Image (cartoon, grey):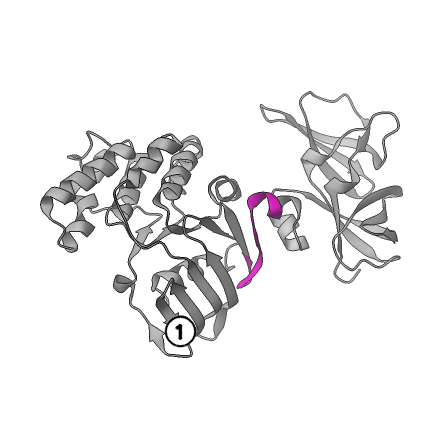
Amino acid sequence: MTEKRAASLFSGVTGEEAPLVVEALEVRLGENPVLKGVDLTVAPGEVVALLGPSGSGKTTLLRAVAGLVRPSGGRIALGATVFFDGKRGVFLPPERRDLGLVFQSYALWPHRTVFENVAYGLRLRRVPEKEVRERVLHLLDRLGLTGLEGRYPGALSGGQQQRVSLARALAYNPRLLLLDEPLSNLDAKLRDQARVWLRETLKATGKAALFVTHDQAEAMAIADRIALLNEGRVEQVGTPEELYRNPRTLFVADFLGNPNVVEALVVALEEPWARLELSGFPVRARAMGPLVPGRLAKLVLRPEALRLAGPGEVNVLEGELAHSLYLGMHHEHWVGVGEALLRFYSPLPLPGPRLRLAFDPEAALAYPAEGG
């Protein structure tokens, strides 16, 4: 589905476009604080992913916005409509929030056809039957489901069921779209393909869209911005590239991708650089916090930043080739540098056993080490 075709999905359908604003949101489950003062804004037409490890609070945040969890403090509003306000005692029930919900499990009625599943919300709102038929068939066509309107969910593939679930959420033109792990039930290849049509469809609505995922690649591919949660707080919000290239904290740097994180001794500071010593080798990296000469730092090196060293290179490390794995598109190598084991990629196998690796200073990030 091209961007132009996706944009036509909602032609002629109007609705109030409003930002979602979450302020100082707190949620407690019993005595356990799950969300600890979360702030987040999602603009109209923006897709924001909630990402984080298990137990970080991302699903609880989505459920609080949906009205499925009652917060203990803070505020949630969509434009002028207040969903929750702890100080004023406001709590709008889910059915009055005008949300489009897409669940991980699809949540389709097995005894209803595709057409009936998508039309259900429209009929509930007493939309004239002629308009129901026009809108449902239009949505099914734009989501590649034409000809399947008479089938039951059990006769559909996982990808088709997910599209029906999305069509049902979009049919009545909700003001806000919420998606909980929308692609997690699809196999890997289909999930890669689904990222494209899901992003195009969400962008075409012009509505604020918030979705939970545990898949980093999915978040980076679909979202305009990512809110990375850690233990009930937002660690950093930004575009996928901002979070990947300029992580503010060691947690963000370590969570995104699968980097090498090793200890190095801070030798000197030359803003914005830090001079370090890694297993006896002098290197330079970007200083990402209050480093102290003579103390340890955590050095973050992404595998794609490492390469075989050429003549005259700076930031050179030497080590022994420990493991090599063939992964199809490239080889993954593990090199022991002192006590550190560094992973990097190359298009070809390496002879070993002794290797010299290099990296650019701006591609290495140095953070204060706890207790360092």
- In this view, the residue in front, 19 or 295, is 19
- In this view, the residue in front, 328 or 193, is 193
Position of 157 with respect to 254 (left or right) is: left
Position of 290 with respect to 18 (left or right) is: right
Specify whether residue 187 is in view: no
Q: Residue at point 33% right, 72% down?
A: 91
Q: Which residue is mark 1?
A: 85
The C terminus: image quadrant: bottom right
Position of residue 57 measured from the top left corner of the image (x, y, whole percent)? 48, 60
User: What amino acid does circle 1 point to?
Assistant: Asp
How packed mark 1 is, by other alpha carbons closer than 10 Å (few <14, some 14-19, many 20 or more), is: some
Position of residue 13 measured from the top left corner of the image (x, y, whole percent)? 26, 45
Does residue 296 lie above or below 184 as drawn?
below
Q: Residue at point 85% right, 31% down?
A: 313
Does residue 287 lie above or below 145 as drawn?
below
Q: Is residue 247 magenta?
A: no
- In this view, the residue in front, 120 or 209, is 209
Which segment is the magenta one?
Answer: 229-242
Does residue 226 lie above or below 332 as drawn?
below
Does residue 227 lie above or below 9 as drawn?
below
Position of residue 299 measured from the top left corner of the image (x, y, whole percent)? 76, 48
Q: Is residue 231 magenta?
A: yes
Specify whether residue 328 is in view: yes
Badge 1 marks a residue whose secondary structure is strand
Residue 17: which quarter of the image?
A: bottom left
